[in-house]
Image (cartoon, rainbow, N blue to C red):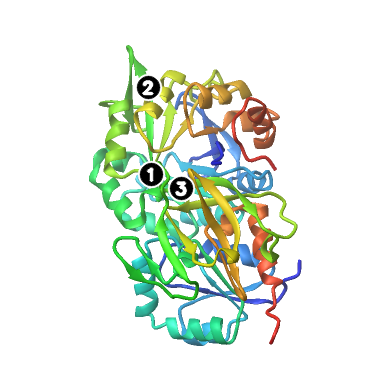
Amino acid sequence: MTTSLKKVVIVDYKMGNVASVKKAFEKLGARVKISSTKNDIGSAQYIVLPGVGAFGEGISNLKKLGLIDILSKSVLKKRVPFLGICIGMQLLADTGYEFGKHDGLGWIKGETIKLKSTNLPHIGWNNIKTKSNKLFSDLPDNNFYFVHSYFLKPADKSIVTSTCNYDQVFSSSIQKDNIFATQFHPEKSQLAGLKVLDNFLSYTHAKN
Amino acid sequence: MLKTRVIPCMLYNGMHIVKTIKFGEMRTLGNPVQFAKVYDSRNVDELVFIDLAATEENRKSDLETVRKLMLECFMPVTIGGGIKNIQDITNLLKIGADKVCINTAAIENPGFITEAAKKFGSQCIVISIDAKKIGKDHYVFKNRGRTNIGKVALDWAKEIEQLGAGEIFLTSIDQDGTMGGYDLKLVKEVASAVKIPVIACGGAGKVQDIIDVVKIGKAHAASLASMFHYSGHTANSIKERMDKAGIAVRIL
């Protein structure tokens, strides 16, 4: 494993359980802190924004905790490797449309919209079609675990690194520079998921 | 394409993993954490862990055991037994459970299903139905198969879907532990009546039973215990046969 002593901060913003994400990174040998303090986020080597829940609540919790500025500074200016999972991917958009219209973090041009599939939520194991991407090198399997009804539709399609088909084809992951995000839950996707997280930890941003 | 799941069902009596026959005699099988470890190493799609004695012994889920078990699991896990209120669910989710399985509390207070679904999302709330054939209908039972609540399984399934349940864990009391095949009529009745996924449980003895419950019964997932406990089958050996039968599964 490539990841010993890497320091991961998982942002705790009261959006579902983070225990599984912590456990998965620890399994890979990383040092993990679950935190909602500016100090921890400001000094993180890797930042993970996980979570399950509604878009509006996610953004409002980040605001209430006063974390948006420090996250933007770390990810957009300092270029700390960032991984958004599920709602943590959706929140990157400019706008989200779950229970009304909400502003997102706006790091990725695009919108978070509802799937048109017949049966929602989309829940269970589904296969993804990957493009060549750091996150997906040497995957043992391409099935991942999904639990969601919304997805991030980026304006720039070239940042989409995988797609999934559930009555409609949607973007199941993206990468823009140091910003990675997956709609599926790598922490719940056994060997393939652990490989994705391990690949994330082996990413270092090339300094300009 | 969404995959049909094969889910080991772990029944716990507060001390050990056990296996019942028709909800009766319990055979002790071993340590839950060891079981979880083996299932994780075999890449099962999901795990269901039910503390079947919690409600009747009037105690809560054994959080310490669940916590230890969760440490071994890198797949979705559903925990059931003794769940009565929102705090019970919060406690389980906090230690990594993905879904909770509720039986008695849903029967005694159907409003609890809605309350829980609103708070945590439907995807998190699994309602289990224990059904037994009487005459030509299947009736819902509580208290581990002892008390007939007087409702037909099909009607109760529709009701709990309306109330916000995300999934139904449907067990045939008659077939439990017999390894004589699922109650296909029961599963088909329920699975055809609701849109939410139905996990069929009770009776799997051979791979064909599982293929039948998916193809004929229309189940979204098959749960089984005895076959894993007492036969040489693994989730993968079962799914290889399902794949040949044309069912979309995840094989590793």
Mark 2 lies on a secondary structure that is: strand
Residue that appears at 63% across and 66% down: A25
Residue corresponding to mark 2: B132
Task: Give me the C-alpha separation between circle 2 and circle 1.
Answer: 23 Å
- Residue holding disc 1: B166
Q: Does residue A42 sit above or below B249 in this rendering?
A: below
Instruction: Output the chain of dot 2.
Output: B
Label located before the other in sequence (2 or 1): 2
Amino acid on which the number 1 mark rests in the picture: Gly
3D distance between C-alphas at marks 3 and 1:
11 Å
Where is residue A31, by image quadrant? bottom right
Q: Residues within 10 Å of mark 2 (few under 14, many from 20)?
A: many
Tag of residue A122 = 3
Residue B113's mark? none
Image-based side of B155 in relation to B185, left or right:
left
In depth, the one of A20 and A180 nearer the eye is: A180
Q: Residue at x 70, y 77 (%)?
A: A204
Contact flag, marks 2 and 1 (Cβ < 8 Å):
no
Instruction: Give the side of residue A111 with respect to residue B152, left or right.
Output: right
Front tag of 2 and 1: 1
Left or right, residue B216 beside residue B166: right
Q: Position of residue B124 (x, y in %)?
A: 41, 50
Taking the spot 25% from the left edge, 40% from the top edge, the residue there is B108
Q: Nearer the viewer, mark 2 or mark 3?
A: 3
Front residue (pair A31, B162)? B162
Q: Amino acid at mark 3?
A: His
Q: Secondary structure at mark 3?
A: strand
